[in-house]
Image (cartoon, grey):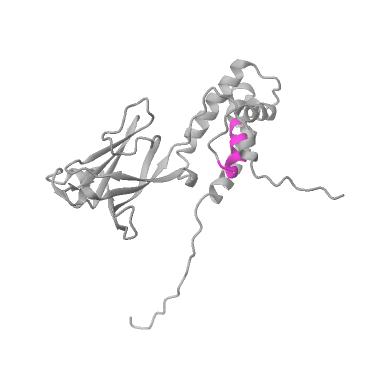
Amino acid sequence: MANTTSGTYTFDKTYAIDDIITDAFERIGLVGSSGNQIRSARRSLNILFQEWGNRGLHYWEVGDTNIDLIEGQAEYKFFRSSDDGTSATTTSPASVYGMSDVLEAQLRSNRTQTTQADSPMTKVDRSTYGGFSNKLSKGTPNQYWVQRFIDKTTITVYPTANSTAASKDLHIYYVKRIQDLDATYTDASDVPYRFVPCMYSGLAFYLSQKFAPQRTQELKLFYEDELARALSEDGSSTSVHITPKTYYPGT
């Protein structure tokens, strides 16, 4: 009788944090780790995830939400976690935590209707926003400025919404941080299957710096190679059309 396949696609969620830590220790030749070593590995894995935040955009952490605009209000706050504070307004989505940056924003009207319409907004830097003379002037918001703090991310719109624009929403695409690993070692990681190989090898590389320094350089090469492949695969494919241009003498 021929063997059958499993029919499942859950390897990335089947193995919990304690399994990831066990495998990483096995890679550096350490079997039967102690409680302190396990806690050390969890810290290293959290540091690894934060280091990934410096490696570019991770598409699985891109989300979108709508912000209810309030007449005359320029700044809208999103905190790192519920422990850092609450939203500046009761109408902003308080469940959005861990926001790292805002990629795009649109002014959206008639959100719940078939006549929904979006108008793109321009992201400006601090110098541009600082040059606006009356930052509380009212009108139809068409520009926004993002500030990234330790405990929160703020979005400042210009101009502030007038009575007409206040009936519309600020729709944003934002980047979330990778969720932390807490002391519940049976939890799954906030990582898609594409990044599972480099997560394992990355943790082994980090642990080698503390428990097997003679293997650090070797494991770093494995980690960087697997991470590069994962980053090249991450993204959103689009159609590309290249049209040759004809040049004529004298033009």
User: Can the viewer see residue 121?
Assistant: yes
Q: Eyeballing the image, is 222 above or below 46?
A: below
Q: Eyeballing the image, is 208 above or below 126?
A: above
The secondary structure that most of the magenta stretch takes on is helix
Q: Decide if residue 29 is on the left or right side of residue 162.
A: right
Q: Decide if residue 3 is on the left or right side of residue 152.
A: right
Q: Decide if residue 91 is on the left or right side of residue 29.
A: left
Decide which of 127, 4 is in the foreground and name it.
4
Decide which of 141, 236 is in the foreground and name it.
141
Residue at 24 percent across and 45 percent down: it is 69
Q: Quadrant of residue 188?
A: top right
Residue at 34 percent across and 59 percent down: it is 114
Quadrant where the C terminus is found in the figure: bottom left
Q: Position of residue 49 (x, y in %)?
A: 50, 34
Q: Eyeballing the image, is 247 above or below 119?
A: below
The answer to whether residue 244 is magenta is no
Q: Position of residue 211 (x, y in %)?
A: 63, 22
The answer to whether residue 202 is magenta is yes
Decide which of 6, 216 is in the foreground and name it.
6
Magenta segment: 192-203
Q: Position of residue 40 (x, y in %)?
A: 56, 21
Q: Quadrant of residue 183?
A: top right
Residue at 34 percent across and 47 percent down: it is 172
